[in-house]
Image (cartoon, grey):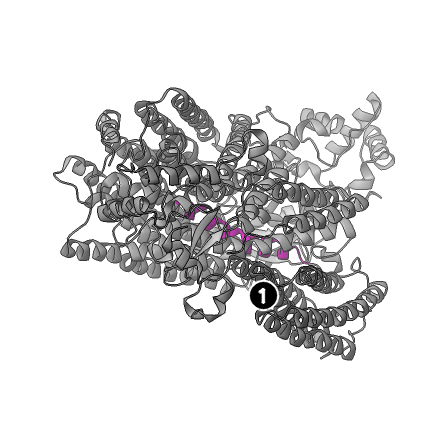
Amino acid sequence: MSEVTRSMEATSGAGAARVDRRRRALPNGVWGVALFIATEAALFGTLFATYFYFRFNSPHWPPQGVENPKVALPLILTAILVSTTIPVFFAGRAARAGNARLAWILFFVALLIQGGYFGVQVHEFLGDLQKFPPSESAYASIYFTLLGAHHAHVVVGMLIEVWVLGKLLGGITNYRLIGVRVATYYWYFVNLLAIGVVFTQIYPAL
Amino acid sequence: MDTRGRDLRGKRAAPAGSLVRRLLLLAGLGCALLLIAGCGQSQGGQSTLHPASDQSRKILHLFWGMLAAAVVVFIGAVVLLAISYRRRNREGIPLVEAENEKAVSSGLVVAFGIVIPVACLIVLFFIANIGVVKATDAPAPGQTKMNVTVIGHQWFWEVRYPGSAAVTANEIHIPVKTPVNVTLKTADVIHSFWVPELNKKVDMIPGHPNTLELYADHVGMYRGQCAEFCGLQHAHMSMAVYADPPAKFRAWLANMAKPVAPPASPQAKAGEQVFLTQQCASCHTIRGTSARGTIGPDLTHLQTRNTLAALTIPNRKGYLGAWVIDPQHFKPGNKMPGLNLSGAQFSNLLTFLEGLK
Amino acid sequence: MATVSTPETIRRLHRLDRIWQERPGVLGWLTTTDHKRIGILYLFTSLAFFAAGGTEALLVRTQLITPNGSTLSPAAFNTTMTMHGVTMIFLFVIPISTGAFGNYLLPLMIGARDMAYPRLNAFSYWVFLGSGLFMYVGVATGNGPNAGWFDYMPLFCYAFLAVSFALVFALPALSVDCLFLELDRRLGFNFFNVGHGGNVLLWQHLFWIFGHPEVYIIILPAFGIATSIIPTFTRRRMVAFPMVALAEILVAFIGFGVWAHHMFSVGLPTITTIYFAAASMIVVIPSAIQLFAWLTTLVTGKPTFTTPLLWIIGFIVFFIIGGLSGIMFAAIPFDQQLTDTYFVVAHFHFIIFGAAVFPLLGGIYYWFPKVTGRMYNEPAGQASFWITALGSALTFFPMHIVGLLGMPRRVYTYPANVGWGPYNLSETIGSYILAAGLVLMVVNLVWSYFRGPASGPNPFGGATLEWSIPSPPPEYNFPVIPTVSSAYPMWDVEDREHDVDKLNRGEMVLDQGHETPASTTLDGYFDEILDMPSNSPWPVVTALMITGVFAMILTGHLVAMSVFLGLFALSVMGWHSVEPREA
């Protein structure tokens, strides 16, 4: 290997963290998740816009015969989900510092909380589906589509975490570090979305 | 640089020789065609070039103005292309321009790409979107004395006159020189109501009635057509607007409001029974009989109409008979089934239908 | 590369050849991640769809040749017309511009050895191929921006950057729209059902929020090709380069604020229509800047009117006409009078065929020598341009007039007494002439592929980096990562000599693996060497599974859908099972 390429590689290996971060290229994995989040944000933007488009074109919201949504339970659930930002954040830091064990534990804690959250949400979702099915109103149609879309994102986030947990068992490499970073960014996004979704969900009762 | 490639480039050019001439020819041909179109006469057509109302005329004048500006821009661009064609044999290779040239060419781009277009667009904005828009907007409810409701169906137009029992289809009568407020609804999918010689088009949206003003400044027939794809027979969903002298219009409306007179002859009476006992009455209404169907057009005064099937065929005996025997022949996919009638039933039915005056 | 001669240099080139060698045969094409091979797959697939869409157009025109025509039944006409539109937009223009031109040329223009996500790139092709309906999802993820030599990109690359961003943000609206429709149809949801509080206009809003940026997605690659061809054939740099680059990016953004100008006749409040009309007028400005930059470059250069430039001249003429008729639609009352008539059909065919497809055809001629190593036949090339342009004018210009005479779009027939006959006759004759021009082009290129003279690396004296390497390019593209200090690197003679020196010294050859350089995000300095994935079976397998998932949803086989979903998850895991070589 030539001298020039060798010297360049010195900046990309394990000692990467010591190089001035402003001069570093973003890894392709991070570009990828940034683009992915951008499309997902646009997708949810469209769902939110649809919700309020219906809202402002309807005389009654929710329509007559449908009771106002619960307020307390969705807020508490969302608070619990958003609180997993903390273990996810520290898992990312631990992985960067080379502590695979701590990162693994923190991700596992986050996964447990998120799993619990998801279980309760599915229960609620199925219960609501009995009360006001989407075949009866546009309100129910957008309600279940918005919530369903968010729950699907939670599932994908948990699958990514499972994958990261599997990878971390084999120790930390540069590639896995990027994987961890991608997983944390994705969860920040899903948690942020959860706040928007829950306030849209409970909006008629506010 | 590859010298071989240069040789290949060197032996081109002859066929490109008439580039500019051809472009000019093309432009000239286009303009000529347009002029011919503009001067041609149309009677009962639906041309935006033959306005019969203030609204349509203002839109047409707007178009001529924009076209004039567009022709100037187009000629300017062709002149630039012509100049560049003349420069194909100039001395030297320009690769990089001198600093003073750079300022000049950037200045040109700023002038022609930003300054002049912005100025033109501002003028256009105020003329079109502040001025003409007001003139073509529908009047506020209650502003006009005359009101008509038009309901789009797959594939015909139901026409109602609020305050009168009159209902008809596809042929809308209005008094001449009188603003008429038209409420536009649909019974099924999105349609678009468009009579170009009288006004712009407005869509018929489910659950969202729109309004449009119709005004005709001379007596005549004005053709219109559905302008939003609405299914299989979108192409055969036309209408005619008749602007009548006020007295004639009043007589027409008074007749339309009346139920139909009882059949005069025994054949017609038998025909009425065919109409009521076969499938006809389940889709069509004839006021004055027990036929109350709403899927097809109201046939109460069928013989006052000049056409059948939303202007698809003329309303004459031969056509009416052919239509009843095989409606799918003229307008495949329409909702009227062919009926299995005996010869006598058929001729009685026709006699009855011809009496619906 | 004139003076590559030292034994050490030749050994380096052999090493690169060995490292980047593609698998032979069908398996090689199935598992390829080479951007050039993917580009060629896109090219042939989208051209096949172009032929299908063109045949549908001829059928439509044949039906309309006379009043009350009876070539097609109403149902067949409506199907053919719809397929023509969907095929041309989604299966031809977008895939050929971003998939074929973007894939093949972007890395070659910025001195890279592959696209940023080679396997995702291959995956997106296979999804496009496997499912026409859902292909656009793949295109959106296939062409993300990469950390290339941002500062020195040619204008072609700026255009594609703008397109990629527009795709990322516009497509989700269409995806959601289709999701709503599918939920309505399959599960009885009520998004568009007025009886239960739904709203049919929602479909139109969402469609056009996608649809108008989509117009710029279609047109920007054409602008990029025009700004590649014009400097080469005028022997000078583009006038007002920074303004053109900025205009290309701006147009993609402003395009998001104008969607409702497609809906002026649905009865929106007047004040809403005025806002959208104003926004639509603003979008004219970036196009005007580019137009005059092209014209000024032509006037101040020394143009050579051979085939590629002729197509660009045709493009400029058609774009001016289509652009001017487009501005007319920003006048609300005029829009309300002429929308949904043949005047609109004329307008968007001048734009989509004249302004978007002409440059693509010119681009095929322009880069044909680069891809095949052979020259096309010049007189036949020029003839194909003139025949196609004449046919297009005859086909699309009379549509303006027949629209003004009141002919609505999407009618399968028209009566004899309204005076539309002669114009429709001209349109139909024109469409056959147009098709003849395209057939001549195909014949020319097929013949030239086998019999054309060798072209050499740079037959036109082009200014961008793809012309610095042999034709066809080697699998590794560049033997040495090139030095670039302007957007016209081939005209910077010193840089090119410097590259040869570097190769001889073994600097920046990157011959230790499947490697490409990465640069810092904003200032474009060389940063690190990336180990790129090579041949992989996972893109095609994963694409097959996801296509299966969507096909099963659409056909209502939910059990089979779940099986495909599981297989899809497994193939994603397989995809990520191999980690790149660590430095």
* Residue B72 seen in the figure: no
Q: Is residue C571 visible?
A: yes
Residue C316 is left or right of residue A26, and the answer is left
Look at 58% across and 63% down and name the residue there. Answer: A177
Q: For the point 71% across and 64% down, which residue is it?
A: A154
The tally of labels here is 1
Q: Position of residue B151 (x, y in %)?
A: 67, 50
Q: Give the range drawn in magenta.
A: C199-222
The residue closer to the viewer here, C95 or C176, is C95
Q: In which quarter of the image is the C terminus of chain A?
A: bottom right
* B258, above or below C68, in the image: below
Q: Quadrant of residue A186?
A: bottom right
Query: How crowded is the residue under tag 1: few (<14 C-alpha within 10 Å), some, or many (20+)?
Result: many
Q: Chief secondary structure of the magenta span?
A: helix
Q: Looking at the image, which residue is at 57% across and 25% down?
A: C69
Determine whether, in the image, residue C332 is placed left or right of residue A150.
Answer: left
Residue type pointed to by label 1: Arg
Q: In this view, does B333 lie above or below B172?
A: above
Give the residue pinned by disc 1. Answer: A181
Compared to C8, does A118 lie above or below? below
Name the image quarter holding residue C469.
Answer: top left
Q: Is residue C103 left or right of residue B39?
A: right
Magenta-colored stretch includes residue B1: no
- The chain under label 1 reads A
Q: What element carries label 1?
A: helix
Residue A200 location (% of width, % of height)? 68, 72
Residue C208 highlighted magenta (yes or no)? yes
